[in-house]
Image (cartoon, helix red, strand yellow):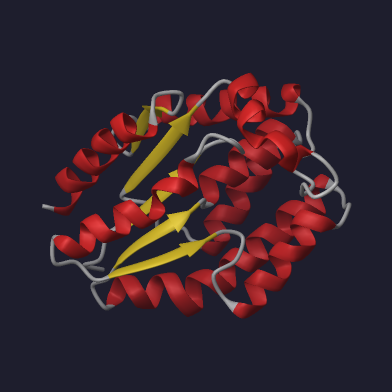
Amino acid sequence: MSGRFITLEGIDGAGKSSHLDAISAHLRAMGREVVVTREPGGTPAAERMRDLVLAEDMSPRAETLLVFTARADHLERLIRPALARGCDVLCDRFTDATYAYQCGGRGVPVEWVRTLEHLIHPDLQPDLVLLFDAEASVARARLGSRQGSGADRFERQDEGFFERVRAHYLERARAAPDRYEVLDASRPIDALRIDVLARVSRLAR
């Protein structure tokens, strides 16, 4: 695979998705072909599963299985073919989010998720994980009105849930410092974007 696989991670409200277009444009300016996608989602079937995950109440293990089912289709139909063509794939969340949200947030055993990961993509990890890190209180304040009736199942979680998710993200980043770039998402967006694009440039050279 000659393409580079870059993922954006962080708790809801950290602001990661606001950088997707800038990163994509930056890579294209460097002469790279870029595919932008998201998880859960990325294919028609996976997008329908995303709707279920975000809207329907279900057990944590059922939620985890549905996320990985969507991921299997996403990998087979979009991510792996794009990487094989030499495209850079820029994905809003991937398996690190499952560890953070389902293990850290919901309490699903890490060993259970690790087994599913090995079944679905034993040979593939992101080349770079951009972790947009923000305290749960800051992220929730940014969500603002989205925490009301229009919020999805995750956005409606309490601050304690997001603190557990954040802690799990940071634990994974400490365990794989070469793969993760931890970014202070509480900084002004323009200053943060300079650091984001600089880190992407180093990978893309």
Q: How many marks?
A: 0
Q: Is residue 45 above or below residue 18?
A: below
**Residue plotted at (57% across, 44% down):** 97
As drawn, which residue projects farthest toward the left? 205
Look at the image and tell me whether residue 123 can be seen.
Answer: no
**Residue plotted at (55% across, 63% down):** 120
**Residue plotted at (41% across, 50% down):** 7
The image quadrant that residue 137 belongs to is top right
Percent of width and height locating residue 141: 65, 26
In the image, taking residue 194 as reference, residue 180 lies left or right, namely: right
Percent of width and height locating residue 92: 49, 53
Look at the image and tell me whether residue 51 can be seen.
Answer: yes
**Residue plotted at (60% across, 40% down):** 99
Percent of width and height locating residue 34: 30, 68
The image quadrant that residue 62 belongs to is bottom right
Q: Is residue 47 above or below residue 167?
A: below
In the image, taking residue 30 as reference, residue 107 lies left or right, namely: right
In the image, taking residue 93 as reference, residue 123 lies left or right, namely: left
Nearer to us in this view, 197 or 203: 197
Nearer to us in this view, 123 or 105: 105
Quadrant (top left/top right/bottom left/bottom right) for the N terminus: bottom left
Nearer to us in this view, 204 or 117: 204
Percent of width and height locating residue 46: 64, 71
